[in-house]
Image: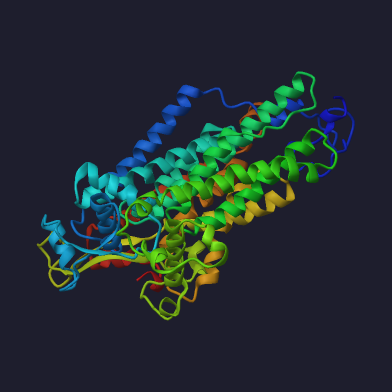
């Protein structure tokens, strides 16, 4: 085992050969024991760590649940998802709703009349997981604004909790984890998407949950590997890894919310393989790439990709069980040809349904459609074109809480606007993170870079159709992770601060604290336009910093 312990920290080694003498790196610095390099100890603040985590999560909950039922109407695409969800809950499959005259179904539901559905099935253009989640809130609290917004608010809040614990595990710092959670809690886009019954906040949650499982698996597998080395073995590899199975389930649920999760699955599948390869190199395995591809890659594919596919298929159980669902009778009227004869009719019909949905998302109709709030993904990192979900203009002074002076009207809006300072600082942090990932081979920065790119870059291939800034809600957790890691670099290690008399830690703390405070203040300033508050027109205009925001 003497040669093994000379290898540099797990994911930085590029060869299985030791680089220097026992226990030192190429600069002559003494290395920690191999076990500590494979699995650094977690912070010893279990109780206080959870208290801080729950305190920030509670703050996030207040921001997301505060006056959640306001406005008392359907906001933007809630008109589709909330009704589809209730249809699933009531009939087991999606039905069309009355639409003549336009908007009549919405008005009747708000008035308490829920008899708005036809007998004919509806083609819904997204999978059913997110709508079933919305339906759970409607089951608990009724078919009303609070009912259909409850689950988005809950899962938006839980995303904050997951992020705190994930970043804490990545950095071994409760402070950095809490900074990440606090920043996500005060992101305007995340707050808005948690307060409306759309699908994207569920997609963000399941992606973060899956990535959290992969980070936990990285620790779990390396701890077991280090333990086996301590017992005198050269290390064993685990074929069944519970956390990876859990990640596969979460990825499947993400895919069952929106298909855009497929890119994230591919990206993190490759990153998980890179982590396994780094571990093998860290213990000095020769020909690590080929051994890892065979021994690690195949089980990883089965645990992550195959489990995700099985989970995704299972999410269509309701559709498979209801013969009246849209396209369910396709196979009975179209005999199978060739290899499709071995596929059961229900699944052939389901495949055809997917073909119909894909045609909707990529067909000529939608390619030539336009929308006043459509946004090019190139501008998402700097919040170039946010989207307005709802607006009531020309509120007269003295009505609906308007305090404007005579001659000036008020308005109330819901703008899906990311907290600008957070997004702009995050864009810089992602650039710095890419440099640190490549230059210092710091594995931690690979996670937000891969997550951000897989949630962002694929949209460039679909920019001929209307796409919107709110899709970027899946990007902001990875932006926040990158930002928290960079802030951790600025802050500096606590141990170093105790061992030196320089003001390094003090200066770093001041810089980090100032940035976090500015982000919180920026969020507080835009809060009224995130939550439908009545504002005099000049006050609203003061928050529209660019013409493209209007």
Q: Is residue 422 visible?
A: no
Q: In which quadrant of the rendered view does residue 497 lie?
A: top right
Q: Is residue 523 left or right of residue 414?
A: right
Q: Is residue 283 visible?
A: yes
Q: Position of residue 508 (x, y in %)?
A: 58, 41
Question: Which one is in front, 419 or 261?
Answer: 261
Q: How is the image coloured?
A: rainbow
**Quadrant that contains the C terminus:** bottom left
**Quadrant that contains the N terminus:** top right
> Which residue corresponds to the image point at 42% horizontal and 54% vertical from the top-left?
257
Question: Which one is in front, 35 or 318?
Answer: 318
Q: Is residue 446 above or below residue 507?
A: below
Q: Position of residue 348 (x, y in %)?
A: 46, 61
Q: Position of residue 430 (x, y in %)?
A: 59, 54
Q: In which quadrant of the rendered view does residue 548 lie?
A: bottom left
Q: Residue furthest top?
A: 231
Question: Which one is in front, 184 or 315?
Answer: 315
Question: Which one is in front, 240 or 31?
Answer: 240
Number of marks drawn: 0
Q: Position of residue 470 (x, y in %)?
A: 41, 61
Q: Is residue 545 left or right of residue 433?
A: left
């Amino acid at each position: 085992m003497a040669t093994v312990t000379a290898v540099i920290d797990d994911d930085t080694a590029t060869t299985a050969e030791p680089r220097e003498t026992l226990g030192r790196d190429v600069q002559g610095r003494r290395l920690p024991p191999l076990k500590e390099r494979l699995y650094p100890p977690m912070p010893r603040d279990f109780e206080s760590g959870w208290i801080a985590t729950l305190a920030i999560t509670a703050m996030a909950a207040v921001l997301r649940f505060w006056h959640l039922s306001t406005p008392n109407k359907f906001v933007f695409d809630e008109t589709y998802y909330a009704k589809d969800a209730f249809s699933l809950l009531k009939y087991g499959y999606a039905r069309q709703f009355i639409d003549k005259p336009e908007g009549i179904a919405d008005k009747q539901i708000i008035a308490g009349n829920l008899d708005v559905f036809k007998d004919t099935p509806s083609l819904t253009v997204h999978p059913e997981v997110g709508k079933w989640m919305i339906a759970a809130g409607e089951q608990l609290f009724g078919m009303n604004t609070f009912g259909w917004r409850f689950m988005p608010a809950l899962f938006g809040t839980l995303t904050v909790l997951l992020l705190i614990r994930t970043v804490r595990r990545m950095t071994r710092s409760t402070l950095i984890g809490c900074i990440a959670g606090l920043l996500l809690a005060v992101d305007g886009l995340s707050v808005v998407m948690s307060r409306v019954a759309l699908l994207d906040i569920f997609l963000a949650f399941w992606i973060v949950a899956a990535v959290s499982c992969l980070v936990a698996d990285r620790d779990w597998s390396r701890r077991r590997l280090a333990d086996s080395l301590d017992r005198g073995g050269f290390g064993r590899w685990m074929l069944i890894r519970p956390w990876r199975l859990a990640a596969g389930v979460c990825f499947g649920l993400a895919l069952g919310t929106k298909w855009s999760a497929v890119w994230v699955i591919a990206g993190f599948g490759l990153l998980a393989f890179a982590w396994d390869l780094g571990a093998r190199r860290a213990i000095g395995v020769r020909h690590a790439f080929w051994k890892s591809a065979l021994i690690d890659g195949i089980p990883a594919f089965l645990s992550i990709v195959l489990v995700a596919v099985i989970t995704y298929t299972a999410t269509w159980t309701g559709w498979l069980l209801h013969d009246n669902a849209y396209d369910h009778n396709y196979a009975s009227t179209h005999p199978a040809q060739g290899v499709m004869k071995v596929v059961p009719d229900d699944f052939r019909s389901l495949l055809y349904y997917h073909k119909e949905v894909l045609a909707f998302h990529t067909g000529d109709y939608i390619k030539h459609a336009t929308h006043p709030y459509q946004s090019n993904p190139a501008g998402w990192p700097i919040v170039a074109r946010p989207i307005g979900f709802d607006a009531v203009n020309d509120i007269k002074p003295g009505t609906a809480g308007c305090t404007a002076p005579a001659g000036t009207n008020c308005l109330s809006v819901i703008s899906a606007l990311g907290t600008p300072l957070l997004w702009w600082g995050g864009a810089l942090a992602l650039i710095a993170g890419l440099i640190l990932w490549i230059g210092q081979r710091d594995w931690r920065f690979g996670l937000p870079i891969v997550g951000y790119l897989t949630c962002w870059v694929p949209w460039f291939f679909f920019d001929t159709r209307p796409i919107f800034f709110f899709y970027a809600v899946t990007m902001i957790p990875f932006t926040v992770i990158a930002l928290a890691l960079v802030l951790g670099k600025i802050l500096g290690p606590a141990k170093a601060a105790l061992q030196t008399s320089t003001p390094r830690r003090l200066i770093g703390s001041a810089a980090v604290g100032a940035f976090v405070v500015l982000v919180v203040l920026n969020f507080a300033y835009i809060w009224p336009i995130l939550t439908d508050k009545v504002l005099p027109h000049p006050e609203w205009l003061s928050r529209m910093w660019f013409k493209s925001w209007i």
